[in-house]
Image: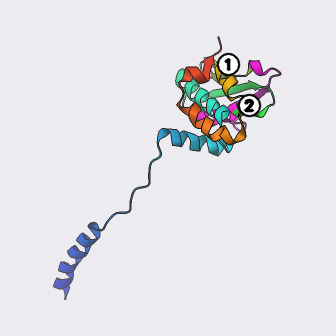
Amino acid sequence: MRLSSLFLLPSLLLGCATATPAPAPAIPDAAEAALARIRVVHGGAGPWVVAGYRMGASALRTLGVSAGSFDLEVAHHAPPKVQYTCIADGAAAATGASLGKLNLALVEEAEASRVATTYRRRSTGASVTLRPTAAFVARYRDLPRERLAEAGREVLDQPDAEVFEAVP
């Protein structure tokens, strides 16, 4: 009886090893992952929040800081109008800066023409200030709600220079 059990065990193990494995979950591409991250923070992925995300990602590369770092502080200057303040949520999605960590601030600015976000690396004092381009603002300023998601995907694929620029 023991001998037959010894012969049966390897065949059972081999049988299990040859079973069809469960399919691996699909890995989203980088664009889908970015849009998902933006939606988690903002609730949607329209053009203004995607622009903020793109600006934040660029600032991280420029300053050599990792997302989630306490070494980064972000100050977004904008009038209290949704499309302009959406940029701050995009910056938060890209950088991990937040009100709770005290490294994200919304600075009320009276003029829409002065919308800009400053990213500063605390340890070095290095900073970069970015703003949406005039062409971006003209194209997406008064977009109907039903076009927001489509426009957000569009903004994700545009060259940086069409979406934002550095403030001298």
The residue that appears at 64% across and 33% down in the rendered structure is 47
Disc 1, SS: helix
Q: Residues within 10 Å of mark 2 (few under 14, many from 20)?
A: few
Tell me the SS state at disc 2.
Answer: loop
Q: Position of residue 51 (x, y in %)?
A: 63, 30
Q: Position of residue 166 (x, y in %)?
A: 62, 16
Q: Magenta span has 91?
A: yes
Q: Is residue 27 above or below residue 22?
A: above
Which amino acid is tagged 2? Asp
- Please identify the quarter of the rendering in which residue 46 is found: top right
Residue 122 location in percent, x, y? Answer: 63, 23
What is the distance, in whole Å, between disc 2 and disc 1 at their CAs? Answer: 14 Å
Quarter of the picture holding the C terminus: top right
Q: Is residue 67 visible?
A: no
Give coordinates of residue 61: x percent, y percent: 52, 25
- The residue lying at 25 percent from left, 72 percent from top is 15
In this figure, which residue is indicated by the disc labeled 1? 134
Asked if residue 32 lies left or right of residue 75, the reply is left
Magenta-span inclusion, residue 36: no
Amino acid residing under circle 1: Ala
Q: Quadrant of the N terminus?
A: bottom left
Q: Nearer the viewer, mark 2 or mark 1?
A: 2
Q: Report the magenta residues as a range.
A: 87-114
Tell me the residue that label 2 is attached to: 142
Left or right: 12 in relation to 62: left
Q: Nearer the viewer, residue 47 or 90?
A: 47
| Position above or below: 44 against 55 | below
